[in-house]
Image (spheres, helix red, strand yellow):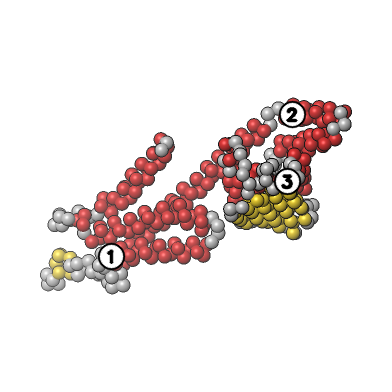
């Protein structure tokens, strides 16, 4: 563990112990009762606090991200209500008190003015007994929500920072790169190497797109598809006939915008893991636009490949998943299927 993780772990342990110690610290200290720590109200409050602590971690690590942020508000409300009832009722039931029957406080040993008989106070309501549980339960919910929102904001800032760093790395003297590419393109034309010239032109266009266009939040779908077209054409030029590539784009691209480079990772992955010069390889890419919906299907058969360690990280797919969650939180569907011989990607994005 790093020092930061140790500090977080210690903070959680100390905070949990302090929270569980609240009933003991706030328990009344009557002089005639020696074992006040083990009194029924104190034990009841200890059980309630333990349940609230368990609910805090369940709420923080699961319910907020898997239910609340996915806008399943009815399910979220039912779970909160169920947890609230358990925390209010279960401790009393476990300590032998029936919440539906009035609970007498005992006889006050003071004398009345009418004859010296002891006065029995009014029965304490169950709501009075658990009002601090209600307060603590509300605090637990609000505190865990605030922590999660803070963590998400921090993560968003971190991802934004990393994206900015990546853009800066990609923009190392781009004019020099473009001028060099144009120079090589001119040499290829002069030497009548048409395939080489075409390859350089497509690569130059892809580099220009990455450097100049992807800094914007959203770009036209036509430009994104054009980038993919060039990528697949370059792959076709370098691969032999044993690699069967099927690529199609269906639908109207005009007046549609999309987050840049949101599709290419899945296509790159197919060429990375689906191409081997010594085996028959098959890659199918289909992009279909229907009104405001885009559907991407990528299929490839698995082959034996030898990759550099940095190419095996799988960070491209994971980063794209994070971007989809960030940019299209409720407007996309992603399904990754694989078996022993095939890998298939199905992605659907609501563009508007």
Q: Which mark is residue 227?
A: none
Disc 2 is placed on an element classified as helix
> Reading the chain from its start, which is encountered first: label 2 or label 3?
2
For marks 1 and 2, the one nearer the N-term is: 1
Front: mark 1 or 2? 2
Q: What is the number of callouts on the image?
A: 3
Q: Residue at x 12, y 70 (%)?
A: 116
Q: Label 1 vs label 3: CA separation? A: 71 Å
Distance, label 1 to label 2, CA atoms, is: 74 Å
Q: Residue furthest front?
A: 278
* Residue 269 rendering spot, x and y as whole percentages: 64, 45
Q: CA distance from mark 2 to mark 3?
A: 33 Å
Tag 2: Cα neighbours inside 10 Å, few (<14), some, or many (≥20)? some
- Find residue 332 and report its image quarter: bottom right
Q: Residue at x 71, y 36 (%)?
A: 211
Give the image location of residue 317, x and y in percent.
61, 46
Quarter of the image for the N terminus: give it: top left
Select label 2 or label 3 by which is in front. 3
Q: Residue at x 75, y 59 (%)?
A: 291
Q: Quadrant of the C terminus?
A: bottom right
Q: Quadrant of residue 159?
A: top right
Identify the mark at residue 242; answer none if there is no mark: 3
Give me the disc on residue 94: 1
Q: In the image, is residue 132 above or below residue 3?
A: below
Q: Nearer the viewer, residue 130 or 181?
A: 181
Q: Which residue is mark 2?
A: 177
Q: Position of residue 350 (x, y in %)?
A: 68, 56
Q: Quadrant of residue 56?
A: bottom left
In the foreground, 206 or 175: 206
């Amino acid at each position: 563990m790093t020092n930061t993780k140790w500090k977080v772990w210690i903070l959680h342990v100390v905070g949990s112990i302090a929270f569980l110690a609240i009933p003991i610290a706030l328990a009344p200290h009557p002089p005639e009762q020696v074992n006040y720590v083990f009194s029924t109200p104190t034990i009841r409050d200890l059980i309630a606090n333990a349940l609230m602590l368990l609910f805090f971690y369940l709420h923080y690590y699961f319910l907020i991200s898997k239910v609340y942020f996915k806008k399943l508000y009815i399910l979220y409300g039912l779970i909160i209500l169920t947890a609230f009832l358990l925390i209010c009722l279960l401790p009393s039931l476990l300590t032998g008190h029936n919440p539906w029957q009035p609970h007498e406080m005992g006889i006050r040993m003071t004398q009345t003015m009418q004859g010296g008989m002891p006065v029995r106070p009014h029965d304490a309501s169950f709501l009075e007994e658990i009002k601090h549980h209600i307060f603590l339960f509300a605090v637990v919910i609000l505190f865990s929500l605030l922590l999660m929102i803070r963590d998400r904001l921090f993560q968003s800032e971190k991802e934004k920072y990393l994206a900015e760093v990546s853009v800066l790395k990609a923009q190392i003297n781009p004019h020099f790169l473009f001028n060099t590419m144009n120079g090589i393109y001119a040499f290829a034309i002069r030497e009548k190497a048409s395939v080489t010239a075409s390859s350089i032109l497509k690569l130059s266009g892809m580099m220009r797109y990455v450097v100049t266009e992807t800094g914007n939040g959203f770009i036209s779908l036509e430009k994104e598809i054009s980038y993919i077209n060039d990528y697949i054409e370059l792959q076709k030029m370098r691969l032999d006939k044993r690699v069967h590539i099927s690529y199609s784009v269906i639908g109207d691209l005009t007046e549609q915008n999309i987050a840049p480079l949101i599709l290419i990772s899945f296509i790159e992955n197919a060429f990375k893991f689906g191409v081997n010069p010594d085996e028959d390889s098959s890659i199918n890419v289909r992009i279909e636009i229907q009104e405001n919906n885009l559907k991407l299907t990528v299929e490839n058969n698995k082959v034996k490949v030898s990759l550099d360690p940095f190419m095996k990280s799988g960070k491209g797919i994971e980063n794209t998943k994070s971007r989809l969650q960030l940019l299209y939180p409720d407007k996309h569907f992603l399904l990754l299927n694989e078996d022993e011989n095939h890998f298939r990607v199905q992605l659907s994005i609501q563009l508007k």
